[in-house]
Amino acid sequence: MKASEKTAPLRRITKEVFLKAKQYGFSDRQLAHIWNTSEKVVRDLRRKFGVIPVYKTVDTCAAEFEAHTPYHYSTYDQENESIRSDRKKVIILGGGPNRIGQGIEFDYCCVHGVYALEEEGVETIMINCNPETVSTDYDTTDKLYFEPLTLEDVLNICEHEQPMGVIVSFGGQTPLKIAKALEENGVCILGTSPEGIDLAEDRERFGALLRKLQIPHPKYGTAYSVSNAVLVAEEIGYPVLVRPSYVLGGRAMEICYNSAAVREYMKKAVDVSPEHPVLIDRFLEDAFEFDVDAVSDGKDVLIGGVMEHIEEAGIHSGDSSCVIPPYMISEKNLEEIKAYTVKLAKALNVVGLLNVQYAMKDGVVYVLEVNPRASRTVPFVSKAIGLPLAKIAAKVMVGRTLKDLGVKDFDFRKVKHISVKEAVFPFSKFPRVPVFLGPEMRSTGEVMGISSAFGGAIAKAQMGAGNTLPVEGRIFISVNNSDKNEITLNIVRDFLKLGFSIVATEGTARFLREHGIPSDVVFKVNEGRPNVVDLIKNGQIQLVINTPLGEESRYDEFAIGWAAIENKVSFITTLSAAATAVKGIERQKQDGFTVKSLQEYHNEIEA
């Protein structure tokens, strides 16, 4: 459509009509849809008419005395109560409304960013619309605008406040979606540029970058239609992970084991993200996953922490238990992870926070995803290592260097304690909802356990999550064929030494008997009664260890997992998690836990 055709319907629009539409609450985007034009055209015309919002003040002291910590909201009225100062100022975009996948971890980064900029003498302005967060406490920032995180509202505030720049990388995916449009409208984006953000998200360009850097990655493809998706998936090889681009919390991600599942997914995916293609990746089943949080100033890169996931590959990082420092990785693979992180930070011209997700299978480290923004693990890593990564990143974004800030060792800190992050799930509140964990985030919170011993950290984290490990009783075990190995045998022997008895499915029981380990046999879910679900419901199982592999076994896992959650029985899906449970139970059966503050642990790092 030509520009003249786009603006033709607007010739009949008067300033009065425009003002009335805005007072009724119509956004520029809605008006653009109604008038069959673009949002930019509507915005330009609105500004030409002088129809701009003013900001009213919410008096936090109820007029009892002068309020020094007010906050503001927009309206199309006459008098503007928001007075712009002449100080150097930065706007931080928050995470928006609360929902699974975008929670308090990003708000933590926003608030720490505010504290850091205040230390630098910069006026801080927060834009967010979530009343349940610390960033929208009226005394957190110098100025708060309680507004939705849309392009229109953010641009209006930028025009009024005239900031030196805007930070979009602390609030998760929501502010990142408008970063490019903000830059196109003349707003200075502090930190990593929208180009660098887009390069990390664009599958084709990012794949080319990985090949150039000679960094391994799982086979992948991009699909724009159902038939195209099936062809791409078959070329890659099943199972595949399918997902829309530009999502947070793993929303609408699925693991597909055949073409029928891909077709079904694509029918749903069209409604999820019609403006972006569907990404298809080879799913590295039975791999170990790692997360890295780092800060870059454009030249040097600080590796904040390398976390090892305890849960199986394919489970969203927000749902996975993880541990610092990593405990099941060779020094060679650990050095590769650190080297790849530095390479990627420099190639993407990252200034600020960076999160990289890795998978390790058969001794090969693969890059799964790179996010040049804050991640939900930043608070955990910061507390574990005693370095405020978000504060460091905020200062770097306004021109400081890591060396300026006194960072001397860019390698991750050698901590003397073990820190474990455990996810908290709402399943007990919602009977019969699917409990199978996958790439789509399900958790609603997380807890942290710290101890000088691995078992102590595991046990504390499980207790914090309301999932206390048993110290006696019966354990149900069912492992896939690839897990029928010496590792499983050692785990089962350890449980026997702790006084537990074993119940297993026929295949697993046969494997255990062949190696001299006694166990009772129980039916699988579809084999007869009483089966394992019956035993769980009857209180005859105190711990479930079930390592699924393939589509059929995941059906069993759903039934067993639902029964375990409903009956408050601990449920484990990987050998690594089972091995950690042994350590936790061992610690629980000993004399008890030591309790120390975070500061005491951090002092030991410095010593």
Image (cartoon, helix red, strand yellow):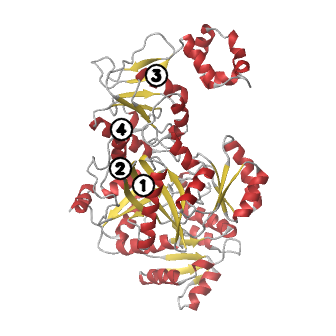
Q: What amino acid is found at the position of numbered circle 4 in the picture?
A: Val
Q: Where is residue 417 in the image (x, y as percent from the top left)?
A: 31, 65
Name the residue nearer the viewer: 525 or 347.
Answer: 347
Q: What amino acid is found at the position of numbered circle 3 in the picture?
A: Glu
- Which is more N-terminal, label 1 or label 2? 1
Label 1 crowd (10 A; few <14 / some 14-19 / many >=20)? many
Label 3 crowd (10 A; few <14 / some 14-19 / many >=20)? few
Q: Within the image, what quadrant is residue 285 found in?
A: bottom right
Q: What amino acid is found at the position of numbered circle 1 in the picture?
A: Asp
Q: Name the residue under label 2.
A: 389
Q: Spatial distance from mark 3 to mark 1, Cα to Cα?
A: 34 Å
Label 4 crowd (10 A; few <14 / some 14-19 / many >=20)? many
Label 2 crowd (10 A; few <14 / some 14-19 / many >=20)? many
Q: Name the residue under label 4.
A: 398
Placement of 505 over or under 82, stated as above or below: below
**Contact, mark 3 vs mark 2 (Cβ under 8 Å):** no
181 on left or right of 525: left
**Contact, mark 2 vs mark 1 (Cβ under 8 Å):** yes
Q: Looking at this rendering, what residue extends furthest in the front direction?
A: 212
321 on left or right of 415: right
Of circles 3 and 2, the one toward us is: 3
Q: Looking at this rendering, what residue extends furthest in the left direction?
A: 607
Q: Spatial distance from mark 2 to mark 1, Cα to Cα?
A: 9 Å
Name the residue nearer the viewer: 78 or 190.
Answer: 190
Which residue is rendered at x = 59% and y = 62% of the image? 562
Q: At numbered mark 3, what does the secondary structure look like: helix, strand or loop?
A: helix
Q: Name the residue under label 1.
A: 293
